[in-house]
Amino acid sequence: MLKRNYENMFLKIIRIVNEYNSIFFTSHKNVDPDGLASLLVLKKVIDYYSRASSYIVLPEGMNEVSKKIVNDLDLKTVFYDPTLITKCSMRTMDSVYIVVDTSSSEQLGALKNAIVNSNYIVIDHHAAGDLEKNSLLAVVDSTRKASSEIVYMLTKDLYSYSAVDAMLLLAGIIYDTRRFLIADPLTLWIAGELLRIEGVNYRRVLGMLQTEMDFSERIARLKAAQRLRFVRVDNIIIAYSYIGAFEGSSARALLDLGADIAVVASSNDETRVVARAKPSIVRRLGISLGRDIMVKVGEYLRGGGGGHDAAAAASGRGDPIKALEYTVELIVDLVKKALKK
């Protein structure tokens, strides 16, 4: 998407939502700071331009960092659970969903069926998934490093941000770029613009993102290391493991141990496979874990998958060990092909 089109896209969003009586803002399960910031700021701006009733509905709550941000900023926002949808007296045709930071319907948890069978808009920065296909409008820009960047570009000339708005978006960007590790010039420009807003405190934003790793997450990381297996392709190490939870954190831990690409599977109510890679590896090989791997894994699991070049996931139904092995096979084949080019 060309940068000059962002404002026009926001005006399209307003035209669409003004046709409905209710707007439901939502994001992926266990919403992270980027999804949270995108939801909160976008709702605030759209409420300014729309007379529809609006609600934030979280399919399965927030992650621990998001909870800390809400507490640290003393936000009084009401977060509804999916039961609101069934209790809402409005007919489906009178409501529209705005789904942010989410590319796959499988990431919507308890809201999946309600959304895919309704009218919805997608605003996201991941590689395109199945949600884009049947949306009323898709504002998807996979060149951006965080959905918070897209929300800023959509609204920056149409709304005056408060310090809290700016700190939310800044927290979302810092979180998704891993403290600007994968930032590009536009990311840094947006961060600079947000920092210029009166009342924004960068140290406070960093403090909001700092949380102590709880005991269960530490145990999960150790179990992932204990069960670790790896395969070597040339001088690239692909590590993989299986645990019960905290698969994203465990995959990052395997990278810290020395892997170039890490894959971790888990299984509770659903089977989930997460992959992480060092940014230098995906740049060197020209591969994308989201586009090249997790879309296929999602299909294998009869669910959905996607993500970024260096961080992606898939979920659905099936044997987690077989799904793990299938994912590793795909990555090994992809790496071999990339090395031959």
Image (spheres, grey):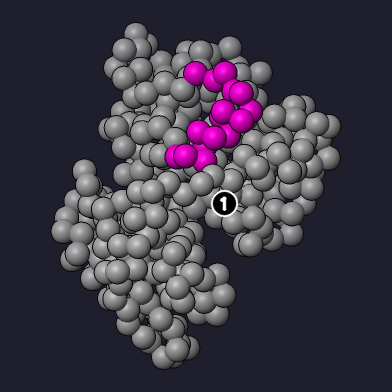
Residue in the image at 56% along x and 29% along y:
70
Q: Foreground: 81 or 308?
A: 81
Compared across the picture, whether 7 is left or right of 306 comes to right
Q: Foreground: 281 or 264?
A: 264
**Vertical placement of residue 340 versus 307, above or below:** below
What residue range appears in magenta?
63-78
Amino acid tagged 1: Asp
**Vertical placement of residue 263 versus 80, above or below:** below
Residue 335 position in % (x across, y down): 40, 81
Residue 108 position in % (x across, y down): 35, 38
Badge 1 element: helix
**Quadrant of the image occupied by residue 116:** top left
Looking at this view, name the residue that lies furthest to the left: 319
**Quadrant of the image occupied by residue 150:** top right
Count numbered badges in the picture.
1
Number of other residues with Cα within 10 Å of mark 1, as a class: few under 14, some 14 to 19, many 20 or more: many
Q: Residue under circle 1? A: 176
Q: Is residue 54 magenta?
A: no
Residue in the image at 47% along x and 49% along y:
213
Residue 122 position in % (x across, y down): 48, 39
Q: Is residue 235 visible?
A: yes
Q: Is residue 123 visible?
A: no
**Quadrant of the image occupied by residue 266:** bottom left
